[in-house]
Image (cartoon, grey):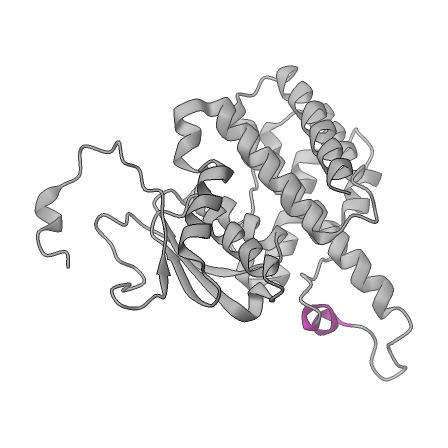
Amino acid sequence: MANTNSEVERRLWASADELRANSKLKSSEYSVPVLGLIFLRYADHRFTQAERQLAGKGSARRGIGKEDYQARGVMFLPPQSRFSHLLALPESENIGKAINDAMKGVEAENEELKGVLPKSYSKIENSTLVALLKNFAAIPVDAEGDAFGKIYEYFLGNFARAEGQKGGEFFTPTALVKLIVEIIEPYHGRIFDPACGSGGMFVQSADFVKAHQKNPSAEITVYGQERVDETRQLCLMNLAVHGLSGDIRQGNTYYEDLHESVGKFDFVMANPPFNVDKVDKEKLKDDP
């Protein structure tokens, strides 16, 4: 299965990258909308699975509702946010607006995602968006939930490499993150990353817990802070496609301790921006 997943990741990336190469967009303009579509495809996959499981379980007095999906840990999707709805739209439609509306619909029904999902699809040509939708619709219907997380990480890594040094601001190489996690061994407790980027430390911590036959959602809780709000959004989507959630706040950790973190967490792990040389030291003189 691992080899099959790797083949799917490579094929999806090759198709998406070819579309970018033939568009007017830079990698930095293309990455967040593409990752948003992977997130939406994951949400739709989980919703469809739950829909099948719930079929026939309603009653004459009470049909299947939003709370039934949420009780299964599934994001509720309104009709305009379904992948099938977007795929069925004629190419003459404004596909960018339709995807923006789909993202707004997800946020409206899932409070924890409010203000998180990208809504810049109107900047992308219709033909590119149609091709991207078809590309991600090709993810096998029997894919496990983990497959979407791996695809998201694969795209994150490739986008980071394409952006060079700037990409390093939101993505730490997986091998380095795994090493940090293996050294710290976060079996159970509260984990904090003060420069969390796209959330790789949290994902690898959850994988570490799963490798020891435990449920990450029951064993660890994650907290993060990230200076760039767009990167915070990437982190929250990354957590979601891995079946995780966390308290991720936007702010500059050099000057703001939004979680009042001193003595509060069991594990603190980070790959901070070491090359920053213009920190206002006067603001840090009382930092404990």
Q: Is residue 268 visible?
A: yes
Instruction: Tell me which residue sits at (64%, 43%) in the image.
Output: 150
In the image, residue 66 lies in the stretch drawn in magenta: yes
Give the residues in magenta: 65-71
Q: How many discs mark residues in the rendered view?
A: 0
Residue 12 falls left or right of residue 269: right
Look at the image and tell me in which quarter the N terminus lies. Answer: top right
Instruction: Tell me which residue sits at (61%, 35%) in the image.
Output: 154
Majority SS type along the magenta span: helix
Look at the image and tell me in which quarter the C terminus lies. Answer: bottom left
Q: Position of residue 218 (x, y in %)?
A: 56, 71
Residue 179 sits in quarter: top left
Q: Residue furthest bottom?
A: 61
Q: Position of residue 54 (x, y in %)?
A: 84, 70
Q: Position of residue 237 (x, y in %)?
A: 56, 49
Q: Position of residue 5 (x, y in %)?
A: 74, 39
Instruction: Tell me which residue sits at (73%, 24%) in the image.
Output: 127
Q: Is residue 198 visible?
A: no
Figure check: 247 above or below 4: below
Instruction: Tell me which residue sits at (79%, 33%) in the image.
Output: 134
